[in-house]
Structure formats: structure tokens, C-alpha cells
Amino acid sequence: MRAHEYWLLLKPRILLAMVALYSTSYIASFASLGQAPFDFPHFVIGFVAVSLAVSGSNALNCYLDRDIDALMVRTRRRPIPRGVVEPKVALVFGLLLLASAAAISLYLGVVPFLLLIIEGAGFYLVAYTILLKRRTSLNVLATAPSVAAPSWFGWFMGGAPFNAQALILGLIVAVWGPLHLWTIAYTFAEDYLRGEVPMLPSVLSPGRAVYSIVVSLLVLVSSTYFLAFLAGSILFTLAVSVINIPLLFVGARFYVTPSKRRGWWIFKLTAPYIVIVLSAFMIDKYLSV
């Protein structure tokens, strides 16, 4: 039971999503080089570094936001608010994980360290959690670099040159992050008001909140087709359309008749969205070699 509580500190769903972004980007980068065999040990080192960095960042976020988490219905069952993990223990645990990630990424080179620790953990913990989350309704934009970091890190580790496709791949992730969080904030607006967190959809008028979410959704969908154009791939275009069409349908219904239930459906669809898009891109790269 104790181990399970520490596992919850790491925010497992976020952790699994971030390592999936790393893995798909790494494989897509490696495949684009047309080389063999696959460098499995190198891949594993990067996988461990990402896992530790995301885990440490999430544990430290739980420590820093423990007062907010205790007030919000959605988060009050996390280990620290429930009293099953002491705050100081969570702090030490998170710092050890992040320090381990920093050591591994620095061993891999300056660029991996900058991408994973400075851009990834740094933006999430310092820019978002400490500086902006409680102060501005645009706080979530500070998470954009941090969620893009595993993708760019994976591409760099895979060995391919950092080209326009790699840039757009990370930007797609960066757009996805705020949209995903804004749909949560719209659905649980009362929670964020109770916790005094000025998340954009919870402080705007209902109409403007819906408009912000729908515009973000359209930017996300458009960016996937721009990546397909750069890749020159009909297969990838068809693959992303499979997830884009239902997302656009739900987004249109949400725009016409807004409701928390329909906002929740956007959240549920965007949860696997980015992994599906990057997986499709990875498979397309392998098939085109």
C-alpha cells in the first residue's frame, strides 16, 4: 500500500503519456535515418532519464500544490492531502528523482540536460507551479515547453537532425498541453475557484471560455495536417484524420451547445490524442524507410 501511494505521487497517467512521447519521437527520429540495428541501450538510458525527470517533477508539484490539492474535489484524494505521505518525505523523494534525472541527462550531454531538466522540469516547476499558476489566467501556457520537452528530447536522442518536422512535432505537443488542461478547468471550474487558481476557463465568461477552447482545438488539428504536409505522407494524413474527425465533431457540438459534459468529452478525447498522433508519425517514418 505504501509503494502504491508513492506511485500515485508520480501522477501515473501523465508519466505514461510523457514516456510514450519520448519513445515515439525517438523511434521516428531513428527510423528517419534508415539505419539498423536499433540502439536499444541508448534508447533505455533516455527512457530512464525521462521517467525520472517526469516522476520527480510530478512529486515536487504534489508537494508545492498540497494546499490547493486539499481544497479541490478532483485532487483531494492525492497522497499528501490524505495524509498517507508526509510533505517532507514527498519533497525529498521528488528531489532525489529529479537529481538522478539531471545526472543521467548531463551524462548524455548538454543538449539533453537543457531539454529535459531546464525546459522540461524547469518550466513545469518554476515557471508554471511556483511563479504563474496562482497569479495569472494564462498560467497554463508555461506548461507548453515542458510537455514538448520529452518529444524534442526523444528526437535528439534518436540521432536525426533537428528539422522542421521535429520542430512541429514538439509544437503540436505544446499546443495539446494547454488545451487538455483548459478542458479540465472548464469542467471543474468550481474546483479551481475554490482553490483560488485563476485557470483561464474558470475565470472567463462562459462564452469566452468556450471560444478559447475551440480555437485551441482548431490550432491543434491544423498543426497535425501541417506536419502531414511537411512529411508528404497521405498515410499519416489519413491516420490523424481518424482521431481528428471525432475531436472536431465533439468540439463543434461543444461550441454550439456548451456544457460541462461536452467539455469533459473533449478532455477524454485529447487524453490519448497526442500519443496516437505521434505513434502514427512514428509508424509512417518506419514504413517510408
Image: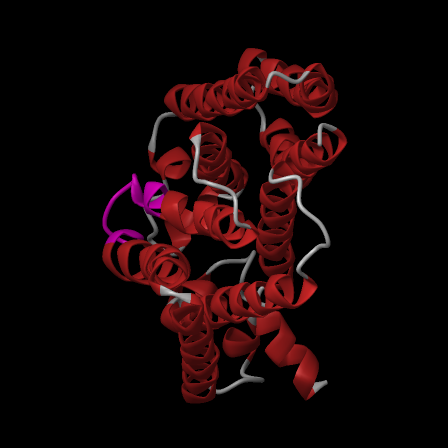
With respect to residue 123, does 186 lie above or below? above
Q: Position of residue 161 (x, y in %)?
A: 46, 40
In terms of depth relative to the viewer, which is nearer, 92 or 182? Answer: 92
Task: Write the residue at 69% across / 36% down.
Answer: 276
Question: At 56% from the left edge and 72% from the top edge, which residue is drawn?
Answer: 9
Q: Quadrant of residue 12?
A: bottom right
Where, by quadrant of the figure, is residue 121 drawn?
A: bottom left
Residue 262 is situated, as x and y percent measured from the top left of the image, at 63, 27
In the picture shown, does residue 77 fall above or below 89?
Answer: above
In this view of the protein, which residue sits in the foreground, 281 or 43?
43
In the picture provided, is 41 more to the left or to the right than 242?
Answer: left
Left or right placement of residue 5 versus residue 129 in this view: right
Residue 123, given in percent of the width and then of the height, sits at 32, 55
> Is residue 250 visible in this depiction of the protein?
yes
Q: Which residues are magenta?
A: 132-142
Count of numbered tags: 0
The answer to whether residue 140 is magenta is yes
